[in-house]
Amino acid sequence: MNRKGFTLVEIMIVVAIIALLAAIAIPNLLRARLNANEAAAQSTLKTVATAAESFRAAQTIPLYPVNAAAMTGVTPAYCDAGIFAAGGRQGYIFTYVQLGAVLGQQYVASAEPVTDNVTGARVFSINETGVLRADVVGTAAPATTAAYELFDVVQ
């Protein structure tokens, strides 16, 4: 008797092997996505810091922008307005806040994950010093210089 095709047992073994490979690969792919989102958030914050410095350098009285709209609402813009869009960008929501007793001398730009531990596992911030800092997810974006300094420096 000449039989062609696969038996049910053979097909079940192939399906089990594919399921095992998927179980190994999918978490690694999700972690890679999270790492890519974090790297993009760090890069975007450095771009915002550069834009704030460019804005300050262009002023007669050197002051940092009052808000994100001051950097994005001019022609040409100092940075892309899409960075501060309501829905976020690359898994993070970006904010820019001017700080200090003397306005225009200090600021903090922050990036918080849209979904904790899914789009990002850390909150990032940068200020006028240009030092990028991070803290664990769930930490509020710093609204003061003291809160910013509690974050760890990103290596």
Image: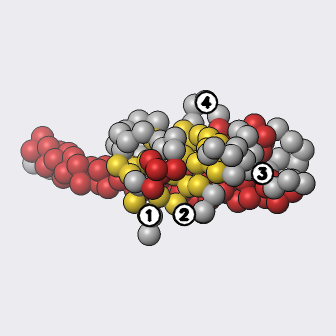
Q: Residue at x 72, y 47 (%)?
A: 104
Residue holding disc 4:
86
CB contact under 8 Å: marks 2 and 1: yes
On the question of residue 107 being in view, the answer is: yes
| SS at mark 4 in the image | loop
> Foreground: 4 or 39?
39
- Within 10 Å of disc 1 (Cα), the crowding (few <14, some 14-19, many 20+) is some
Residue holding disc 1:
153
Q: Which badge, 4 or 1, is on the more N-terminal residue?
A: 4
- Quick check: 44 left or right of 50? left
Q: Nearer the viewer, mark 1 or mark 3?
A: 3
Q: Residue at x 31, y 49 (%)?
A: 26
Q: Which badge, 3 or 2, is on the more N-terminal residue?
A: 3
Q: Residue 103 is drawn in which quadrant?
A: top right
| Residue type, numbered disc 4 | Ala
On the question of residue 81 being in view, the answer is: no
| Residue type, numbered disc 3 | Leu
Q: CA separation, marks 3 and 4?
A: 26 Å
- Within 10 Å of disc 3 (Cα), the crowding (few <14, some 14-19, many 20+) is some
Q: Which badge, 2 or 1, is on the more N-terminal residue?
A: 2
Q: CA separation, marks 2 and 1?
A: 7 Å
Q: Nearer the viewer, mark 3 or mark 4?
A: 3
Residue holding disc 2:
131
Count the labels in the image. Answer: 4
Q: Residue at x 19, y 51 (%)?
A: 20
Q: CA separation, marks 4 and 1?
A: 27 Å
Res 63 label: 3
Q: CA separation, marks 1 and 3?
A: 25 Å
Residue 47 position in % (x across, y down): 67, 57
- Within 10 Å of disc 4 (Cα), the crowding (few <14, some 14-19, many 20+) is few
